Image (tube, grey):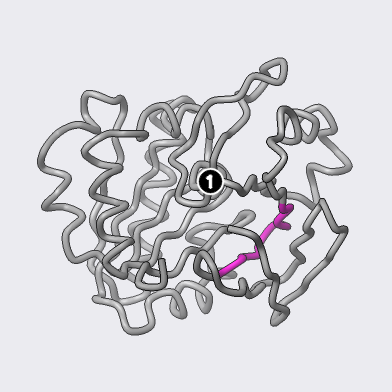
């Protein structure tokens, strides 16, 4: 696993100015190419989806990057062979927020996901924000469901991420309960505050960056910018 690229798990704030320095760090030593995937926003409708795609494009261009879009609407589109070429040579692959279960079901075991994982294992940085961070883990909750879970893409199979943690823990207790439902014995749950990132590789320490904190729920460890968190992933 030591040859994989960096993973960035972001609580919120994708493509905003507050993430500028973090995203520049994620591009260190990488080809100046970002592939952006806004699929998690598809259930929110075309207007909202266009907002995220346009915001991501402008953000990438402001960073001086070539921006490629790999947003798909369904599994049939995700299985198009063209994604092998689109993902090839990416420096930063970014999954933005929305509906985590929809994103997981749409991407898992498709041509697009296999291309994403191939590039990450070859050294590309893989970032996910909110739903995008959740889907890099083992399982994700079905939003507004009754504790129902679906398998995610499993880059970090023993991790579960609660994004927007500083907001959700107080304001949305039902969503919190869903995120904590049906935990396997080896699952570690981390809460990532808004405008905050947890950056690292499996088997190494994970560094906190941004404005908020990361909370490891099993140990009540709270880490802030510059702190290193060791996770069994």
Classify residue 55 as left or right of residue 9.
Answer: left
x and y, in percent, of residue 4 in the image: 37, 67
How crowded pointer 1 is (Cα within 10 Å; few <14, some 14-19, many 20+) is rated as some
Could you tell whether 1 is left or right of 69 in the image? right
Residue that lies at the very extreme toward the top in this rendered image: 146
Secondary structure of residue under mark 1: loop
**Residue 55's spot in the image, x, y percent?**
42, 54
| Residue 192 painted magenta | yes
Magenta segment: 190-199
Furthest-front residue in this view: 185
Q: Quadrant of the N terminus?
A: bottom left
Q: Main secondary structure of the magenta part?
A: strand
Q: Residue at x 26, y 66 (%)?
A: 122
Circle 1 residue: 157
> Where 93 falls versus 175 (above or below)?
below
Q: Is residue 108 left or right of residue 19?
A: left
On the image, the x and y values in percent for residue 127 come to 45, 59
Residue 17 quadrant = bottom right
Residue drawn where x is 72% and y is 40% of the image: 185
Front position in the image: 208 or 5:
5
Which quarter shows the C terminus?
Answer: bottom right
Identify which residue is drawn at 31% across, 52% down. 117
Residue closer to the observer: 220 or 203? 203
Q: Position of residue 176 (x, y in %)?
A: 78, 35
Instruction: Please tell me whether residue 46 belongs to the stretch shown in magenta.
Output: no
- Total marks in image: 1
Relative to 151, does residue 115 appear above or below in the rendering? below
């Amino acid at each position: 696993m030591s040859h994989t690229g960096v993973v960035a798990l972001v609580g919120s704030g994708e493509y905003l100015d507050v993430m500028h320095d973090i995203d520049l760090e994620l591009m260190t030593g990488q080809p100046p190419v970002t592939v952006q995937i806004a699929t998690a926003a598809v259930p929110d409708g075309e207007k909202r989806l266009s907002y995220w795609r346009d915001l991501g494009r402008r953000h990438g261009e402001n960073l001086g990057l070539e921006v490629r879009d790999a947003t798909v609407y369904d599994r049939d589109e995700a299985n198009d062979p063209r994604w092998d070429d689109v993902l090839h040579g990416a420096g930063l692959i970014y999954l933005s927020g929305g509906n985590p279960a929809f994103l997981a079901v749409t991407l898992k075991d498709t041509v697009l996901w296999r291309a994403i994982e191939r590039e990450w294992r070859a050294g590309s940085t893989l970032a996910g924000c909110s739903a995008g961070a959740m889907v890099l883990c083992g399982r994700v909750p079905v939003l507004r469901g009754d504790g129902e879970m679906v398998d995610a893409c499993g880059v970090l199979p023993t991790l579960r991420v609660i994004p927007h943690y500083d907001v959700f823990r107080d304001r949305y207790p039902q969503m919190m309960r869903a995120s904590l439902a049906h935990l396997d014995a080896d699952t570690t749950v981390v809460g990532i505050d808004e405008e905050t990132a947890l950056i690292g590789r499996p088997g190494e320490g994970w560094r906190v960056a941004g404005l908020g904190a990361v909370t490891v729920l099993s140990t009540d460890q709270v880490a802030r910018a510059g702190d290193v968190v060791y996770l069994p992933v």
